[in-house]
Image: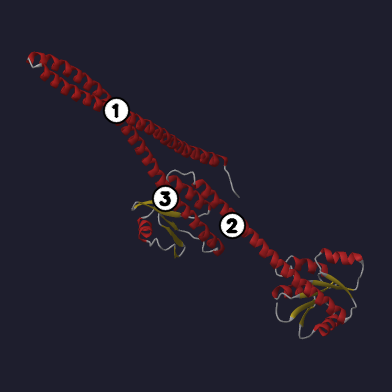
Amino acid sequence: MTNKIDVLAIDDDKFVQKMITKALSSDDLSVRTANDGESGIKQAIDQVPDIILLDVEMPGINGYEVCDRLRNSEATKDVPIVFLSSHSSLRERLQGYEVGADDYLIKPFEAEHLLARINVLIKYYQERLELKQQFELAQKTAIMAMTGSGELGQAMQYLEQSLSYHNVDDLINGLFETTNQFSLNCCIMIVDDGKYSWFSSEGIISPLEKELLEMCDRSVRFLDFGARTIINYPLASLLIKNMPLDDMERYGRMKDLLPILISAINTKINTLKTQESLTEQSVNLLESFKMIKSNLYHLGTTIVKNRKDSRTIMSSLVEDLNYDLLRMGLEEDQEEFLLNRIDSAIEEAMIQIDAGKEIRDVLTFILNNLRNVMDKQETLFNAFTASLATESSDHDDALDDGVELF
């Protein structure tokens, strides 16, 4: 709208044209005139006015037909139209309203009355235009909110599902399912103990893409170049090859959502490595416990056997000594001395041999404790393995059911 309000008066009566021009010409209003319907329509479309004053009865096409054609033109469909007519019946008013008029003014009319009606219509038009703009903005905001909510729902669904993934392949496949829903082509590099693995949503990754991901400084979170963006985390770097530069609002949402997904992948990879280490440690610990238990049992059995063998050997030694002493022909006091020494030594040896029972009791206690520890460790390991299997089954069921968060 220009500084002056542009009024187009379509009327075949020259006197009415002059009256309208005189009444409305001011610093705020400018008036153009047309002598018939066809020329009026052409003027209105060529230079869209702010308001149209339209006579009902004109040669050629009448005011109702002109109004109908103006309302069906994209350029003039919203321009306020005031009918000027010498007829004041309800029928004529209804007919004007039916073809799209905004007001109906009866001839003859006072200049002040005409000016007041025009001011009311201009204000009405401006308010309607503002409301239309507010509606369009609200509609656009609502569409953006619904779109953003859908994208957020897809991201949240991936974050929930990522908890049940048990290997990197499943983790990456789930990511690509989500980015495919975002209509993004991606490739990703995973770092594991200094070794690189590459994956692509398109099934193949070019040598240059590998080099870009490998050489990129992972301490820099975002690297943008054209329609491509690299998002870096310590264990994962994502290359998006078709960022939506033509839609900056969606571009902003993608730059908000994608780092959350890559952060989840980075955390999950650490979790998978920890689970793998704990599982391996648990298996090794169980094997060590079994070996210690076996060795302690063997040691205890050997001690008991050696104790029995020692008693047998000592008993046989006493019998042999008694027989040998009789053959040696020793004096009685010599024989008694030797026998006492032998008895003392045998008694001391038997005391030492009997101490093996205490050792056996200690070993039995240790074995029982090891058995309890082994049972608890095995129970924990089996529960952990079963929980992983349950999570995997629940994840598959969720995919089959097609669960949606939004």
Q: Which residue is mark 2?
A: 148
Alpha-carbon distance for marks 2 and 1? 71 Å
Q: Extreme front residue here?
A: 333
Q: Position of residue 223 (x, y in %)?
A: 43, 64
Q: Which residue is mark 1?
A: 300
Q: Extreme right residue here?
A: 89
Alpha-carbon distance for marks 3 and 1? 44 Å
Name the front one of labels 3 and 1: 1
Is label 1 in a helix, a strand or a loop?
Answer: helix
Tell which of 22 and 162 is nearer to you. Answer: 162
Q: Are circles 3 and 1 on residues that touch, CB within 8 Å?
A: no
Q: Residues within 10 Å of mark 2 (few under 14, many from 20)?
A: some
Q: Position of residue 259 (x, y in %)?
A: 48, 57
Query: Number of marks in the image?
Result: 3
Q: Position of residue 310 (x, y in %)?
A: 21, 22
Q: Residues within 10 Å of mark 3 (few under 14, many from 20)?
A: some
Residue at position x 37%, y 33% from top?
Answer: 370
Left or right of residue 27: residue 303: left
Image disc number at residue 270: 3
Name the front one of labels 2 and 3: 3
Q: Which of pointers 2 and 1 lies earlier in the amino acid sequence?
A: 2
Judge whether 236 appears above or below 354 on screen: below
Kind of residue indicated by mark 3: Asn
Residue at position x 37%, y 37% from top?
Answer: 283
